[in-house]
Amino acid sequence: MQLITIDKDKCKKDGICIAECPFNILKENAGGVPEMIPGGDATCMRCGHCLAVCPSGALTLEGAAPAACEPVKKEWSMDAGAMEQLLKTRRSVRVYRDKPVSHEIAGRLMDMLRWAPTAKNLQPVHWTLVDDRTKIRTMAGMTIDWLRDSNMFPEMVSAWENDGEDMVLRGAPLLAIAHAHKDALNPQADCTIAMTTLELAASAMGIGGCWAGFFMGAAQQYGPLEAYLDLPEGHHVYAALMLGYPKFSYQRIPAREGEKVRWL
Ligand SMILES: Cc1cc2nc3c(=O)[nH]c(=O)nc-3n(C[C@H](O)[C@H](O)[C@H](O)COP(=O)(O)O)c2cc1C
């Protein structure tokens, strides 16, 4: 199959796809119609910008015709105020209602995350989702074992031992773990961006998230937890997020430090 095909009847020869291509693999032919440069196939990162940007729907990428693509819903566009509110009101939620996050909603979130940016559009992020409370508590306990062995955060260890309190995964109904092959181009950044996107998307759907830093530390360093996770060969955990419906709602936005910005 040809990577890029142009419908010459629809193409307005406006050069927009050529200007948009990040790797300059499109150029005008003698008739002013875009065509791929020799070897462009190997350089193309399949980002789909040429297909997405074409106003006349003249460009097909890898058999995906413009008419078959999901349209941009203008009525769903978020204005800057709504975005600012989402960013400022997202909180790390640690107290959850006793209500599971359905597989349907988790699936919808996972679907959205496929559009988070990744280095060179290589899309290396994999997800492990856990909503079995016993498994979540088992992994919290393993993290406590790691903290105890490493002489870290003794107050968390004693809260677990004396009161059974889970300060690691907070009894969250759902745990999302982002992992990728360690030899991927930029697995840490890609997983972090995907997880941040998940936290924001979940927040917009009324689901609270909280980064699970202690769990991440154990999942990266503690053999028994690594074995329990049983990730694909060569994969590392780069991000983890507790998720659940918040028990409480936030009435105001807490203060933060001023911006640390300089212009150079
Ligand atoms: C990388 C990272 C790891 C974190 N790990 C934990 C954690 O293990 N447990 C926890 O309760 N909160 C954790 N947090 C949440 C922070 O404590 C929280 O973002 C911060 O206190 C600010 O609160 P806010 O997110 O509600 O604005 C983590 C946040 C980040 C970014």
Image (cartoon, helix red, strand yellow):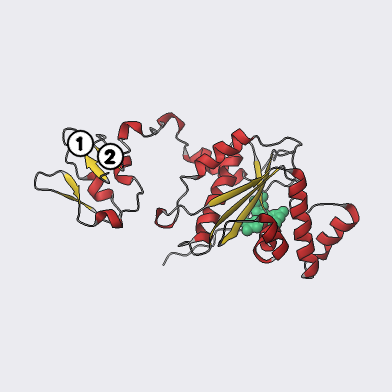
Q: What is the spatial separation of the Cα atoms under label 2 and label 1, in whole angstroms?
A: 8 Å
Residue that mark 1 sits on: 7
Q: What is the number of callouts on the image?
A: 2
Disc 1 marks a residue whose amino acid type is: Asp
Q: x%, y% of residue 157?
A: 83, 61
Image position of 161 with respect to 62: above or below: below
Which residue occupies 16% across, 41% down? 13
> Which type of secondary structure does the marked residue at label 1 adopt?
loop
Q: Is residue 168 visible?
A: no
Q: Mark 2 and 1 residues: CB-CB less than 8 Å, in contact?
A: yes
Which residue occupies 29% across, 57% down? 42
Could you say which quadrant of the image residue 43 lies in? bottom left
Task: Give the number of the disc on residue 56.
Answer: none
Q: x%, y% of residue 172?
A: 73, 45
Q: Is residue 240 left or right of residue 147?
A: left
Residue labelled 2 has its Cβ within 8 Å of some atom of ligand 1: no
Q: Is residue 9 left or right of residue 122?
A: left
Residue that mark 2 sits on: 60
- Of 240 and 254, which appears nearest the observer? 240
> Which type of secondary structure does the marked residue at label 2 adopt?
strand
Q: Is residue 111 left or right of residue 12?
A: right
Disc 2 marks a residue whose amino acid type is: Thr
Displayed-image quarter of ligand 1 = bottom right
- Of 74 and 211, which appears nearest the observer? 211
Q: x%, y% of residue 133?
A: 75, 44
